[in-house]
Amino acid sequence: MRAMTRDDVDAALAIEQAVQRFPWTRGNFVDALNSGYLCRVDVTQEDGIRGYAILMPAAGEAELLTIGVAAAQQRKGLGRAMLSEMLDAARERNLRRVFLEVRPSNVAAINLYRSAGFGEIGVRQGYYQNTNDSEDALVMACDLMQAGERENG
């Protein structure tokens, strides 16, 4: 993965619109870049941009704001690899914990997050707006500190 640039926004937005029921806007991606968030894209010469991830660091922790994989690239381990790389980037910045929200109906994502060390810590009622109603969000967190760091820190 490499840093996302403004030139990558259209490709990331196209993936977002294709794979999300309620996608981010161009402005959301530009705002993330302008805010200095950790914005990454997965790129190959053959396929171009295959996925993206955005992590917002704050006060020693971070929130994974979005992660997306092109439909043709799903179920091949790319999402897992991108998530792992984002968690490694958070560790490199000495962040203690990464949070995220996920729809309870997104079972595949929940399973991915659990396998990466995330656990459920709460529910945000009515967090996601749907066409006619809303859906709760599961709040998940992954503690990035090693056991020895907890004992010493």
Image: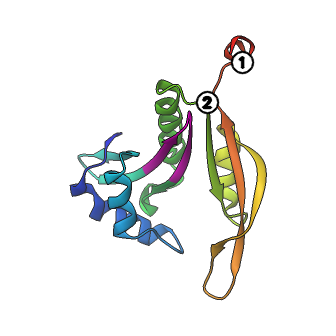
Marks 2 and 1, Cα distance to the nearest angstrom?
Answer: 10 Å
Q: In the image, what residue occupies the spot 52% across and 54% down?
A: 65
Q: Position of residue 101 (x, y in %)?
A: 64, 56
Q: Position of residue 106 (x, y in %)?
A: 66, 63
Q: Which mark is residue 96?
A: 2
Residue type highlighted by circle 1: Arg
Quick check: 150 above or below 15? above
Residue type highlighted by circle 2: Arg
Which quadrant of the rendered structure holds the C terminus?
A: top right
Q: Residue furthest bottom?
A: 132
Compared across the picture, whether 6 is left or right of 102 comes to: left
For disc 1, the marked residue is: 150
Q: Residue furthest front?
A: 59
- What type of secondary structure mainly makes up the magenta span? strand
In the rendered structure, are the residues bearing label 2 and label 1 in contact, judged by CB atoms less than 8 Å apart?
no
The part of the chain drawn in magenta is: 53-65
Which quadrant of the rendered structure holds the N terminus?
A: top left
Compared across the picture, whether 100 is left or right of 85 comes to: right
Q: Secondary structure at mark 1?
A: helix
Give the mark count.
2
10 Å neighbourhood of mark 2: few (<14), some, or many (≥20)? some
Q: In the image, what residue occupies the spot 47% across and 25% down?
A: 92
Q: In the figure, residue 132 lies in which quadrant?
A: bottom right
- Which coloring applies here? rainbow
Work out whether mark 2 precedes mark 1 in sequence or the reverse, and give the earlier one: 2
Q: In the image, what residue occupies the spot 21% across and 56% down?
A: 7
Q: Which mark is residue 91?
A: none
Q: Secondary structure at mark 2?
A: loop
Q: Position of residue 4 (x, y in %)?
A: 30, 48
